[in-house]
Image (tube, helix red, strand yellow):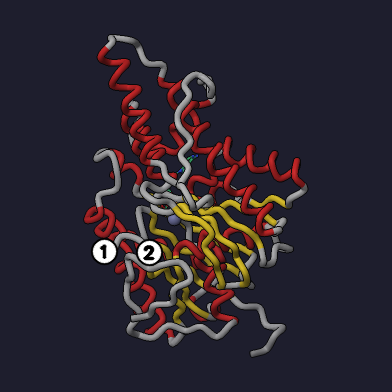
Amino acid sequence: MDNNKDIYILGIESSCDETAAAVVKNGREVLSNAISSQIDIHTLYGGVVPEIASRKHLERVNQVIKEGLDKAGKTIDDIDAIAVTYGPGLVGALLVGVSAAKALAFSSGKPLVGVHHIEGHISANLIENKELEPPFLCLVVSGGHTHLVVVKDYGEYEILGRTYDDAAGEAFDKVARAIGLGYPGGPKIDKLSKEGNKDAIKFPRAKVVGHKFDFSFSGLKSAVLNYLNQAEMKGETINKADVAASFQEAVVDVLSTHLCEAAFETGIKKVALAGGVASNKTLRDRVEKLCKENGFEFYVPSPILCTDNAAMIASCGYFEYIKGVRSGWDLNACPNLKLGEKNYD
Ligand code: KG4
Ligand code: ZN
């Protein structure tokens, strides 16, 4: 491979409720980042309806890919490889992106690179922090995942902790629904919390005995539901902003404390956030503050690169591509793909 040649990767993402396509140069420079969100339709149902998600991806995928190429000022001929999310995620949703990527790769003769969605989230940090190199610590907090990870090298991960039950984003979504904010809960709780008192209600901070870097959020969710039920039974008016702020504080407290303890224990002084929940203002500010106090470098992508997007998939795909990773024509959707697992069956 000519080492001086610029490499352009087209990324495609369809694992949940965003259809996205992006062109990224040399893994770190975003030329386009097209995203078509389905939030409006899923909001009507209070959460993502998998079958609707698949159908919406099918309707939108070709236009979004065209938009990704057009906005970058590129055609498929300029692209070196096509990177696509093949798991984890909703199987029907993943199949749309994988099928579109395979058809495009096949017809254009370009290589295909399957990308792990969570690895993509982690890679979002490499885009805006050109100097960031592994090893670094990353807390990945999304709607489906909560992983505390050592990024040992490009594509090499060690999981220090994970959630036993609900993911952090899932907890935000469920609590938001309980207090009548609707879907998606994270951004709505983030906003409402600004008007509330984070110390108004003392919600529990769960610890997993014997596994200090693991998380558990279902007890917290139940505590919020109990609080709401009891207030209702007593005929008390609920201050939604206080509930939102106190719940958010409990989540942020646990996430930021685990992340800092992991930095102390591993001696890794580069600390990053990733995933949809990483766009939460309080979490970003808290981890930044803790990093400053303890002399750690802090990294977090812009909010648009925290929630699902294809630029992160193209970035991750680039680092796989230059290592020689290629997927076969038999690449399939893997809804339960584990982090660090390469599964092209
Ligand atoms: O990474 P993402 O876009 O999709 C998955 O891979 O799951 O994450 C979506 C999750 C949702 O649960 C959403 O409520 C949460 O991220 N989220 C937030 C915020 N923005 C999105 N949670 C807290 N605060 C936010 N500002
Ligand atoms: Zn995601």
Q: Position of residue 134 (x, y in %)?
A: 67, 67
User: As drawn, is 201 to the left or to the right of 107?
Assistant: right
Residue 256 is situated, as x and y percent measured from the top left of the image, at: 59, 43
Q: Residue at x 51, y 64 (%)?
A: 120
The tally of labels here is 2
Q: Mark yes or no: residue 192 visible.
A: no
Number of the label disc, if any, that sits on residue 88? 2
Q: Is ligand 1 closer than 8 angstroms to the Cβ of mark 2?
A: no
Can you see residue 339? yes
Residue type, mark 2 in image:
Pro
Give the residue type that dot 1 points to.
Gly
Residue at the far right: name it.
295
Estimate the spatial distance between the alpha carbons at disc 2 and disc 1, rounded to whole Å: 11 Å
- Disc 1: which residue: 92
- Kindly give the residue lying farthest to the top in the view shown: 235
**Which image quarter is the C terminus in?**
bottom left
**Image: 50 above or below 113:** above
